[in-house]
Amino acid sequence: MPVVECDPAEARERLAAAGIEVRAGNTEHELWRAEHAGATAVAYEGKVVVQGGSAERLVGLLRGSGGRAHVYFDGACRGNPGPSAVGYAVVTGDGIAAEGGETIGRATNNQAEYRALVTALEVAADIGFDEVHVRGDSELIVKQVKGAWDTNDPELREFRVRARELLARFDEWTLEHVPREINARADELANEALDDA
């Protein structure tokens, strides 16, 4: 359960600026509460406690971090279509800023890859990085998002639009196709999510 030492009033403003609804606390000691990505932030005097869900996304917003990150994404699919999951890792010079894997139900391999990219970018945007270097082992997804290849699939087109919207939030970004071994952690997290389902 992360505890962010901060000015709760400034933290509240950062959450509101990100479009997150902040409401009154449940007790006399709670200054306010907010929910995002399945996690809840509760403000007390001089600190905010975050619990549940993707806590690192709320923590990033509360800290207003900035800086640069390397973002890895991978989708896993057992059958095509079949049970699917996504994995991501957000890494800085200080280590892993966030990582995770989650099942997404039935999808094709390409849908899982796009969902993984979108999830990874949402996490990096929530944490507040200014610059991201994104890497994945799906050449199709990388080339479609960069505009080198097109798609006739309407759902993949929607994912591509969402990925481009998220990339536009960063001051600088790159998107690169890498071999699977360089993307091993994201692949591992996606497969662990499927194994645990």
Image (cartoon, rainbow, N blue to C red):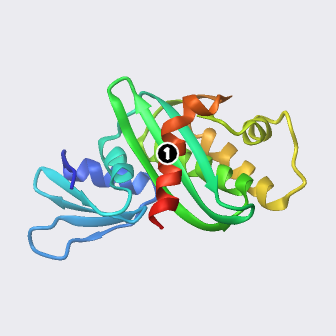
- Measured from the top left, where is residue 186 in percent x and y? 51, 42
* Number of marks in the rendered image: 1
Is residue 133 depicted above or below 2 in this figure? above
Q: Residue furthest bottom?
A: 26
Is residue 70 depicted above or below 197 in this figure? above
Say whether residue 197 is left or right of residue 25.
right
- Measured from the top left, where is residue 11 in percent x and y? 28, 50
Q: Nearer the viewer, residue 93 or 169?
A: 93
Say whether residue 136 is left or right of residue 92.
right
The quadrant in which residue 30 appears is bottom left
- Measured from the top left, where is residue 35 in percent x and y? 36, 66
The quadrant in which residue 142 appears is top right
Q: Residue at x 32, y 65 (%)?
A: 34
Q: Residue furthest right?
A: 152
Look at label 1 and name its amino acid. Answer: Glu
Say whether residue 121 is left or right of residue 113.
left
Q: Which residue is under mark 1?
A: 188
Q: Residue at x 23, y 52 (%)?
A: 9
Is residue 76 depicted above or below 39 in this figure? above
